[in-house]
Image: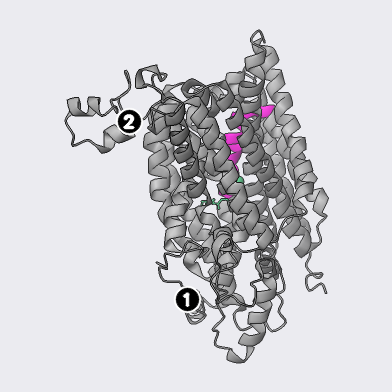
Amino acid sequence: MDPLGTMHFTTIDYVIFALLLVASMGIGLYYALSGGRQRTTQEFLLADRSMSCLPVSLSLIATFQSAVAIVGVPAEIYTHGTQYWFIGCAYILGLLIPAHVFIPVFYRLHLTSAYQYLELRFSKPVRICGTLTFIFQTVIYMGVCVYTPALALNAVTGFDLWGAVLATGLVCTLYTTLGGLKAVIWTDVFQTIVMFAGQLAVIVVGVQQTGGLAEVWRKVWEGNRISGIDLNPDPTERYTFWTLGVGGVFLMLSLYGVNQAQVQRYLSSKTEREAIMSCYMVFPSLQVALALSCVMGLVMFARYCGEDQFHKIGNLSKNEMVLYFVMDMLQDIPGLSGLFIACLFSAALSTISSAFNSLATVTLEDLIKPHCSSMTEARATLLSKGLACSYGLICLAMAYLTHLMSDSVLQAVFKIFGMVGGPLLGIFCLGMFFPWANSTGALAGLGSGLAMAFWVGIGSIVTRTSGGSAAVSHFNCTAVQLSGNITTAIGTALNSTAVPTSTSSQPMGLQRFYSLSFMWYSALSSFTVVITGLIVSFLTGPMKEEDVTPGTLYPLLGNMLFFVPENLKQNLCCATPLGHRF
Ligand SMILES: CC(C)(CO)[C@@H](O)C(=O)NCCC(=O)O
Ligand code: NA
């Protein structure tokens, strides 16, 4: 059955979509032909370290705000209520800690790649393992990012799936290869604005068509979509205040603290102050982004609550709901659906362009340069352009692999971030906060963190448990006679996480371990890295603080014991490292 066959794109919608691609290309060309014309790696990979905080901050949010969040969050709110919104609490510590811990350390070391840090602090093998882990994470993620909007568009409008994937993948490869990081950052700025505009337009029209704000509020309130704070301590509950507000901090740290894409933006800032400022400015913009997608879910609910007799929306996968809602509602307003499609693809483009550039950076800096010390600057720049271009093509291949993914991409991406990003966060924390950690400990820690993460992650996929314990909250619309049907429909929409009939029985033993909420993955795996790393370091001979490269430690213990007199602290082995005051 194809309930969506009637939806069509008008010429003006195509024009708006094409304009997005053309404008992005234009920005790429501009930076290819202006400034230093992308003739040095400093310019191509680090924008000449000359950026100011406003473009950097918009680029920071654009990097990890992809179409996955734009289609995933409203569907989550529609089916489960506003609990997810509490992830906004995690933004406070999730941005303050990067601003005051990670940025100062990275910026003062004058790095290009975040993994250079791992060599300075530990050894070359640790750096290479870190780099390979990052490449693995990013390559999977970019496949999901380019595939998601194309799939949604295809499902709802019949727009050619691989045509959309190719168009976005190739245009993005081209402007990233031509214009370097400057183009990536400035297209991010433009694309973030398009992203916000598209979501806002849909919300405004949606509210109007549903009968005004008061009516939307009444419907979502009566439909039980407004969730109170859920303080259930059960770690297998998918979204609670604890999983979102505490587990989410670790997710945020792995993304905004140590992820190469973001670290590269901090390093491209003119001064350390600008870098810290940009991190602060992410906070309000990220709250706006979160609010827009949550409100969109509420409006979508208000619009269909009790009126979805034909299970129009209930039969869709979570990734298709939003686009269906948009097309259904905006059909009569020319151009508006085009604007929303542009919003969706802006989100995707800004994420994959960051991925291409950061992957080119780490491949050149961490894997190639150490072996070709005599490479000329011109050659290195040419090589980095070749790398950016190759990763663009790899992205297309990964989109094809994503074909096999489950139907909730938001959960899939959170799992990838937790399973691979968490151990990376752990190894940076081990290095910065614990002077005793040595290289063997770091390698053992990273290995065990990854093993732990893949054990629980793959276990949950195989046994289909993580997230399965999420209570499918039932509609409680005014149209009571319909609620049975709608609940069934929502059940269908959630079929990927089909709950076994015996949901009431608590999972036991390993089963319980596998059903750990994926919001805890980052915390679990980074703690595993730190603890294993410390144990192995102490067994193999801990490092002495004076042997650690200056500037690679952050005096966490020293700062936390601010009330202890200075000479006592020296004895406690947590002195401020040479020449570095934080
Ligand atoms: C980083 C967060 C959690 C911040 O809300 C969000 O942007 C997110 O869920 N990002 C990952 C999904 C995506 O690719 O859009
Ligand atoms: Na994005």
Q: Is residue 358 above or below residue 506?
A: above
- Answer with mark 1 or mark 2, whichever residue precedes in sequence: 1
Depth check: 444 or 144 in front?
444
Q: Which residue is mark 2?
A: 555
x then y, percent, for residue 86: 44, 61
- Residue 384: image quadrant is top right
The residue depicted at 79 percent of the width and 48 percent of the height is 400
Quadrant (top left, top right, bottom left, bottom right) of the N terminus:
bottom right
Decide whether residue 188 is among the magenta residues: yes
The residue depicted at 66 percent of the width and 9 percent of the height is 376
Depth check: 253 or 545 in front?
545
Residue 230's disc is none
- Chief secondary structure of the magenta portion: helix
Circle 1: residue type? Trp
Quadrant (top left, top right, bottom left, bottom right) of the C terminus:
top left
Asked whether residue 553 appears in the rendered view, the answer is yes
Q: Which residues are magenta?
A: 178-194
Decide whether residue 575 is among the magenta residues: no
Asked whether residue 201 appears in the rendered view, the answer is no
Query: Disc 1, ligand 1: is the CB inside 8 Å?
Result: no
Q: Are marks 1 and 2 in contact (CB under 8 Å)?
A: no
Q: Residue furthest bottom?
A: 481
Name the secondary structure under disc 2. Answer: loop
Q: Residue furthest top?
A: 374
x then y, percent, for residue 520: 50, 54
The residue depicted at 47 percent of the width and 54 percent of the height is 288
Circle 2: residue type? Pro
Q: Which residue is mark 1?
A: 217
Name the secondary structure under disc 1. Answer: helix
Q: Is 462 on the left or on the right of 513, as rendered? A: right
